[in-house]
Image (cartoon, rainbow, N blue to C red):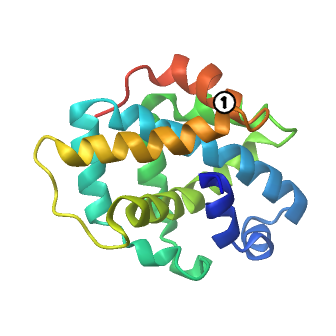
Amino acid sequence: MSAVEEIMDAIPVEQLAQRVGADPDEVERATRTALPALLGGLQANAADPAGASSLAEALGQHDGALIEGGVDLDDVDEADGHKIAHHIFGDNEEQVVGRIGGVGAVSSDLVAKLLPLLAPIVLSWLTRQVLGGGRPEPAGGGGGLQDVLGQVLGGAVGGQRSGGSSGNIITDVLGGLLGGGRR
């Protein structure tokens, strides 16, 4: 099962649609388009030692239990999600939202509403993948954790490249906008 499918299985699409005031089918399409972008952005961050260290610290602040047994959107910290999305995409956040919105016939406005809800869910998924749900001690330089992050995110993102149009976001959009990752 791909990373996007694992995360999608945990997301209550109907509840998410009510939360953002949109049609559930449109929310599902937008979510399936936004998740590879978030994973790709995290991969770009993990590729840089400073970014990997920052990501390790972020994993230490997020509980893998959020995604366990299905997500309750009342437990998702949207303000934290805004910070996560901005950290992942940096000054290119608006451009990324615009480009994601251009894929799969979804609106950029919907993508902008979804990213702060999806970002904490993606970090919870990543925490579970990297640490089995536990919380890491912040790593000073990445080291082994940087390698694990690279493997998990590389596998998650690599699986999306052959998965249709949303996989092109990673190579076409994020590669050009994010370069080697943020710190």
Secondary structure under tag 1 reads helix
Q: Quadrant of residue 42?
A: top left
| Extreme-front residue of the structure | 1
- Disc tally is 1
Name the residue: 83% across, 43% down. Answer: 106
Quadrant showing the C terminus: top left
Position in image of residue 18 (x %, y %): 79, 73
Quadrant showing the N terminus: bottom right
66 and 113: which one is in front? 66
Name the residue: 35% across, 46% down. Answer: 149
Position in image of residue 102 (x %, y %): 79, 31
Label 1 is placed on what type of residue? Ile
Establish if 119 lies above or below 169.
below
Q: Is residue 87 visible?
A: no
- Around disc 1, counting alpha carbons within 10 Å, would you say few (fewer than 14), some (14 to 19), or many (20 or more)? many
Q: Quadrant of residue 24?
A: bottom right
The residue beneath circle 1 is 169
Is 2 on the left or on the right of 79, as rendered?
Answer: right
Name the residue: 46% across, 24% down. Answer: 178
Is 119 on the left or on the right of 7, as rendered?
Answer: left
Q: Quadrant of residue 141?
A: top left
45 and 22: which one is in front? 45
Q: Is residue 13 visible?
A: yes
Name the residue: 37% across, 28% down. Answer: 181
